């Protein structure tokens, strides 16, 4: 349900707030909200590409749009509104007016720096969904570099805070896919084809991972994940030190 009645929204829109979604000084979530309010409007369809073209100079603009959902904004995808194309979205309801100061943090789940460090270290600085490590290239994509972020075990749950048990380490790509607003995720048939193509020993190993809901890492995997978190200068020094140790 919308946090405000139709009459209240009419009053807000009739009274100009002087805010423009084109203003680069505003936060990305605010700009997205204003663009949806002023350019799209409730009950209308828009595309992801149109959103990205409008809110330029901002990374992960799709994520900023998702951040509106816990604040009462209802934005439908083709997954829950079959009449939509994969690229289309439908603005069903406007929630909290996040462009107003008192609502700026509405729906945001604040994660402390301490919790963030704990989760990254607990997950060994690797994506819990695909296993890629920080700054590693994705399989078959030389030159790519994975960026790690924190996702929620329940991506669509709302709330203003998040504890470590509610969080997991994800690469930015998996974080986008799991929200069902960007990208195309593999279906069960495609995954099963890859599973059945594995050698017998790897099938058994995969089944163990499924049972534990985690992929156990060797000490060398753990050391690699920690190494990748060091600044480039320190990584170069450590590589040289290890080479010297092995040659001594």
Image (tube, rainbow, N blue to C red):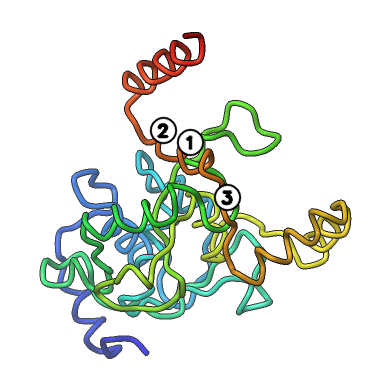
Classify mark 3: helix, strand or loop: loop
Residue displayed at 39% across by 57% down: 122
Residue displayed at 27% across by 86% down: 3
Q: Look at discs 2 and 3 and give the one toward the viewer.
A: 2
148 to the left or right of 211 = left
Callout 2–callout 1 Cβ contact below 8 Å: yes
Return the mark for residue 132.
none
Displayed quadrant of residue 84: bottom right
Name the residue carrying label 2: 227
Classify mark 1: helix, strand or loop: helix
Marks 1 and 3, the one that precedes in the sequence: 3
Q: Look at discs 1 and 3 and give the one toward the viewer.
A: 1
49 to the left or right of 101 = right
Callout 2–callout 3 Cβ contact below 8 Å: no
Q: What percent of the width, then of the height, locates residue 60?
A: 42, 49
Q: Residue furthest left?
A: 102
Q: What percent of the width, then of the height, locates residue 40?
A: 43, 65
Residue displayed at 20% across by 51% down: 26
Q: Residues within 10 Å of mark 2 (few under 14, many from 20)?
A: some
Name the residue carrying label 3: 131
Marks 2 and 3, the one that precedes in the sequence: 3
Q: Residues within 10 Å of mark 3 (few under 14, many from 20)?
A: some
Residue displayed at 48% across by 36% down: 224
Q: Quadrant of the N terminus?
A: bottom left
The answer for how far apart the CA atoms under marks 2 and 3 are is 16 Å
Q: What percent of the width, then of the height, locates residue 48?
A: 52, 55
Return the mark for residue 224.
1
């Amino acid at each position: 349900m919308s946090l405000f009645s139709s009459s209240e929204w009419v009053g807000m829109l009739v009274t100009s707030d002087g805010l423009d979604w084109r203003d680069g000084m505003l936060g990305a979530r605010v700009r997205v909200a204003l663009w949806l309010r002023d350019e799209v409007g409730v009950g209308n369809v828009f595309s992801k590409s149109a959103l990205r073209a409008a809110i330029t100079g901002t990374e992960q603009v799709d994520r900023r749009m998702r951040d509106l959902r816990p604040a009462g904004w209802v934005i439908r995808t083709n997954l829950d509104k079959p009449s939509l194309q994969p690229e289309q979205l439908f603005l069903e309801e406007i929630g909290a007016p996040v462009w107003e100061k008192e609502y700026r943090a509405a729906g945001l789940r604040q994660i402390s720096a301490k919790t963030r460090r704990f989760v990254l270290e607990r997950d060994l600085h690797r994506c819990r969904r695909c296993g890629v490590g920080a700054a590693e290239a994705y399989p078959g994509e030389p030159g790519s570099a994975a960026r790690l972020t924190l996702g929620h075990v329940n991506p669509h749950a709302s709330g203003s805070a998040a504890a470590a048990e509610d969080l997991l380490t994800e690469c930015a790509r998996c974080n986008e896919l799991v929200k069902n607003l960007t990208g195309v995720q593999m279906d069960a048939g495609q995954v099963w084809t890859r599973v059945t193509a594995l050698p017998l020993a790897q099938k058994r190993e995969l089944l163990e991972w499924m049972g534990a809901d985690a992929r156990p890492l060797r000490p060398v995997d753990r050391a690699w994940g920690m190494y990748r978190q060091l600044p480039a200068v320190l990584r170069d020094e450590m590589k040289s030190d290890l080479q010297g140790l092995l040659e001594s």
